[in-house]
Image: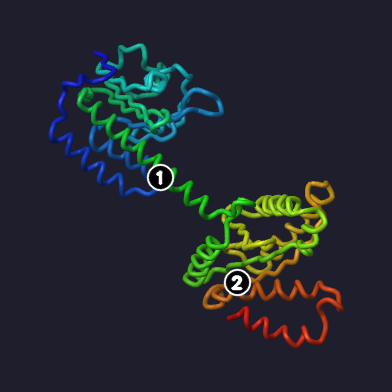
Amino acid sequence: MTQTHPSPSQVASSEEIDKLIKFTCELVQVKSLDKALHFFLGKTMEFFSPTLTSLVLPNKEEGGFIYRLVIGEAAPLITNLRLSPEEGVVGWVFNHESPLFLSEAELDPRVSPQLSQRLATPLKSVLGVPLRIPTKTIGVIELLKTGAQEPFTSAQLNLLEAMADLTGLMVERIYLQNKLQQQANLDPLTQVYNRSYFEEVLSREIARSQRYNLPLALILLDIKEFKKINEDYGHQAGDNLLKKLAHLLRQQIRKVDSVFRLGGDEFAILLPHTNEEGARLVQQRLEQALAEASNQNKILPIKLTIGLHSASGGEEAGDLFAQADINLFQKRYKDLSPLEGQDELQQLLLPFFEEAIKK
């Protein structure tokens, strides 16, 4: 028996309605895409008792589909299984954008032969529903029963489709929220993190450093004579320079590190689990990469003023930004000519500047 869609006259049982209400109440508490999809598949195991439940997604690299997330004792048998674009229940559901219920799956030609071959026992029944966001189908949810298990029912297809639609809405909502949050955290010009997010991350990493007594390093840098670059080449050239520098900084750090634009031409690089020696190596790598980019005419020939500080955990980490800022300040004035920056008055005032920064 094959049914592509249950009859509208079928009325869900009170048990199924209760399950859907319970599912909805718990789903809205989930805050991440990964957890939402794992929660959904976990609930299909609880509600429908399949042999396997799978999230199947388009295979962008090779075309067709791939079993990305599979739950059940036999999951290793079909995880990462690849199907052609028209193959199996998955291909039918995705291309028709419609659910499919097979009560006698072993005899149905739409079942993928390679799927059947991988299963240890004969395939009994299949439920397949599209995972949709409002604009398109993004994947397929497939439930399988094998051996002597009772086949699925049309009412279960109704419930599964409703759960999939709710999950699709939640996935889209989480995605949009994450995207908005990410945009709020980014500097619009350079697309690295902005000053407000820097303060949030710095506070979090300092707390982690203090709790676990871990090293934490901060590099502050700015472009020497950036004002003159704007005057000589124009503000558009200055903006392009900032974007290229931000891109270069991102290329030279680890995934756990973060780059921030603090304002103007000033950037920060936060390096968790990094001592002063490690931070110096990062500084050297940045300077070398900048020199190579300048030699290849990929970026205007510039020099950076760099200040860094590393804290080894404990209360010292709380002064991380102040110390790095002081070091940057000192480097900035050290690089000036005696006439510009090393006069007697400056030497007298420097300690007051340092004290002000500390506060």
Label 1's element? helix
Q: Which mark is residue 145?
A: none
Measured from the top left, where is residue 109 in percent x and y?
36, 11
Q: Can residue 116 be seen from the camera position used here?
A: no
User: Which of disc 1 and disc 2 is earlier in sequence?
Assistant: 1
Residue depicted at 72% across the width and 62% down the height: 283
Position of 283 with respect to 300 (left or right) is left
Amino acid identity at mark 2: Phe
Q: Where residue 213 sits: x, y (%)?
A: 52, 71
Q: Position of residue 142 (x, y in %)?
A: 34, 27
Most foreground residue, 247 or 139: 247
Q: Give the left or right position of residue 68, taking residue 158 as reference.
A: right
Question: Is 63 displayed left or right of 127 in the figure?
Answer: right
- The residue lying toward the viewer, choosing from 179 and 6, is 179
Query: Of residues 250 and 104, which is closer to you in this image?
Result: 250
Q: Position of residue 117 (x, y in %)?
A: 39, 19
Reply above or below: 162 against 122: below
- Residue drawn at point x = 22 percent, y = 43 percent: 22
Q: Is residue 214 left or right of residue 41?
A: right
Disc number for residue 174: 1
Residue at image position (29%, 24%) is: 127
Residue placed farthest to the left in the image? 14
Position of 127 relative to 317 (above/below): above
What is the three-letter code of the residue carrying label 1? Ile
Q: Quadrant of residue 336?
A: bottom right
Which corner quadrant of the image does residue 121 belong to?
top left
Examine the rendering and report whether any part of residue 188 can be seen.
yes
Q: Which residue corresponds to mark 2?
A: 321
**Which secondary structure lies at badge 2?**
helix
Kindly indicate whether the residue at mark 1 contacts the one at mark 2 (C-beta within 8 angstroms).
no
